[in-house]
């Protein structure tokens, strides 16, 4: 009898272990990949001071696991967004301008189509092969997937998750890759396609007859609706979507990119936080889990413009979305045992913080903070250059605002002028308007949750793909 009891107990224990293993295997695998486009470490530092002062802390600062990421592309020391995001999504180095294709793919710019739009495919045959993305892997495992961005949803960063093409500017073709069953659809996304698509860029989904840039006559917004997507074209329609009653949604809120956060009208455009949280609500319905990419895309655009205040505010809006996502994930997964959240950038910019500035504290209505003129830390006097003119704490390595000759004519610069929303900070090297370049410095990566402790040291951007894939069990 004793022997039978021992056997029975052992069998019961085996069953319990088996049940535990099954429940672990059946637990959802959630990945949220946050990408701050152009968000170099200097921009992060400036945004921290801007929002909470030198001693403050952004959500990004508090992520428990951190690493540095090398961002060079296959053919360039300084990458553009397409191959850098594609390296994160595929683990493959590719040439600048190329989206999720093999390393031998040559970037070929679009040619003019029948309507004169420079959007026609010029890739040619035999020009590289598609490489699988994390989103496609997730979909093949039965997970849901979505993209959220403040840029056009066909822009380089979001496009790298779901499209394969020789040049990032082929946005008509990229848009077609999103529509299940339609011509050009990316079948690797499964029959259902992405469950969530939120951002800007209706021009590439509408025919020329409706004010868009599609010369093929297709209205992809209608095609989305015909495929069962809940569709929103403004904030009110977005707020009205009941995620309990739909399994898929598309929100395209602007013809091109969404507004900078400083300029955003909340009655017309939802915030990045609102889009992120609603995406999680819908994707979280899948018991197997989901992969969500969230891009703070307009950080990059403001830096290209050298309008630092816009860049810093968009960085703060990006950070707010990260906080909201972590808080929401913890409601159903308190210890984040089944959720991995990664925060990084695709490249940096040439923004610099000049020294030796007196501490400013956060920016407020009464003080420009880090956006202001540089004041000497010792006595608070306004610092002057060799021409006897003041200068700002924030500057750029290159950009449009560079005085020709002596800066003595700028002696009247004041904090009100340089702290304005649209002020273009000065640059060392003069470029055309809006053409400040990316920088080649390593970027920050922070992680929290399932498998986050594998992100450490200085790693290549292709390694991030491997680490995310392993941590999520994809």
Image (cartoon, rainbow, N blue to C red):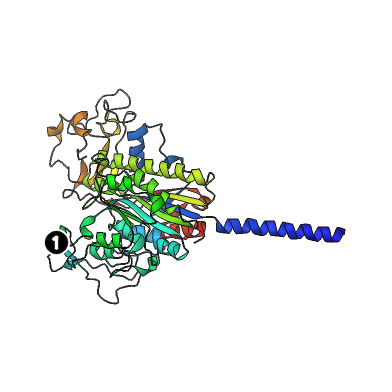
Quadrant housing residue 75: bottom left
Q: Is residue 451 left or right of residue 362?
A: right
In depth, the one of 430 and 266 nearer the eye is 266
Question: In which quadrant is the N terminus drawn?
Answer: bottom right
Say left or right for 265 vs 181. Answer: left
Quadrant of the image occupied by residue 424: top left
Q: Residue furthest right?
A: 1
Secondary-structure class at tag 1? helix
What residue sits 32% from the left and 45% below the top?
A: 239
Residue located at (25% from left, 66% from top) = 173
Residue 350 visible to the viewer: no
What residue is at 21 percent from the left and 34 percent from the top? 420
Quick check: 265 above or below 361?
below
Image quadrant in which you'd find residue 187 = bottom left
Residue at the image position 29 percent from the left and 56 percent from the top? 153
For residue 273, above or below residue 95: above
| Residue at image mark 1 | 209
Of 419 and 256, the residue lying toward us: 256
Left or right: where 359 falls relative to 437: right
Q: Residue furthest top?
A: 379
Q: Nearer the viewer, residue 351 or 388?
A: 351
Q: Position of residue 294 (x, y in %)?
A: 37, 51
């Amino acid at each position: 009898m004793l022997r039978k009891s021992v056997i029975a107990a052992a069998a019961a224990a085996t069953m319990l272990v088996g049940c535990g293993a099954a429940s672990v295997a059946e637990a959802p695998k959630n990945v949220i990949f946050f990408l701050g486009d152009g968000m170099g470490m200097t921009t992060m530092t400036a945004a921290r001071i801007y929002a909470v002062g030198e001693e403050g802390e952004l959500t990004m600062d508090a992520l428990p696991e951190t690493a540095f990421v090398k961002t060079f592309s296959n053919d360039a020391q300084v990458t553009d967004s397409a191959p850098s995001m594609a390296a994160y999504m595929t683990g493959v180095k590719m040439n600048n301008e190329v989206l999720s294709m093999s390393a031998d793919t040559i970037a070929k710019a679009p040619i003019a189509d029948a309507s004169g739009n420079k959007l026609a495919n010029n890739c040619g045959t035999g020009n590289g092969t598609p490489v699988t993305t994390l989103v496609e892997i997730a979909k093949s495992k039965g997970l849901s997937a979505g993209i959220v961005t403040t840029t056009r949803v066909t822009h380089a960063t979001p496009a790298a998750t779901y499209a394969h093409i020789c040049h990032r500017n082929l946005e008509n073709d990229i848009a077609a890759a999103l529509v299940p069953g339609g011509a050009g659809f990316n079948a690797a996304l499964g029959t259902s396609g992405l469950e969530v698509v939120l951002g800007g860029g209706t021009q590439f989904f509408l025919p020329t007859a409706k004010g868009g840039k599609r010369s093929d006559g297709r209205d992809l917004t209608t095609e989305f609706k015909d495929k069962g997507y809940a569709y929103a074209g403004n904030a009110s329609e977005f707020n009205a979507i009941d995620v309990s009653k739909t399994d898929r949604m598309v929100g395209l809120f602007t013809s091109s990119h969404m507004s900078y956060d400083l300029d955003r009208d909340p009655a017309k455009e939802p915030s990045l936080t609102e889009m992120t949280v609603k995406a999680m609500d819908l994707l979280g319905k899948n018991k197997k889990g989901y992969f969500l990419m969230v891009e703070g895309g307009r950080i990059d655009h403001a830096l290209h413009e050298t309008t630092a205040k816009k860049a810093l505010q968009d960085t703060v809006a990006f950070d707010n979305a990260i906080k909201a996502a972590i808080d929401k994930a913890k409601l159903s997964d308190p210890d984040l045992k089944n959720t991995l959240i990664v925060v990084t950038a695709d490249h940096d910019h040439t923004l610099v913080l000049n020294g030796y500035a007196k501490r400013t504290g956060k920016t407020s209505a009464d003080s420009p903070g880090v956006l202001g003129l540089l004041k000497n830390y010792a006595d608070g006097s306004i610092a002057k250059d060799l021409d006897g003119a003041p200068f700002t704490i924030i500057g750029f390595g290159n950009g449009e605002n560079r005085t020709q000759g002596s800066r003595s004519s700028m002696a009247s610069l004041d904090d009100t002028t340089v702290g304005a929303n649209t002020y273009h900070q000065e640059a060392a090297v003069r470029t055309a308007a809006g053409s400040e370049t990316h920088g080649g410095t390593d970027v920050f990566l922070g992680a929290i949750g399932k498998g986050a402790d594998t992100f450490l040291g200085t790693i290549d951007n292709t390694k991030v793909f491997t680490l995310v894939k392993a941590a999520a069990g994809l």
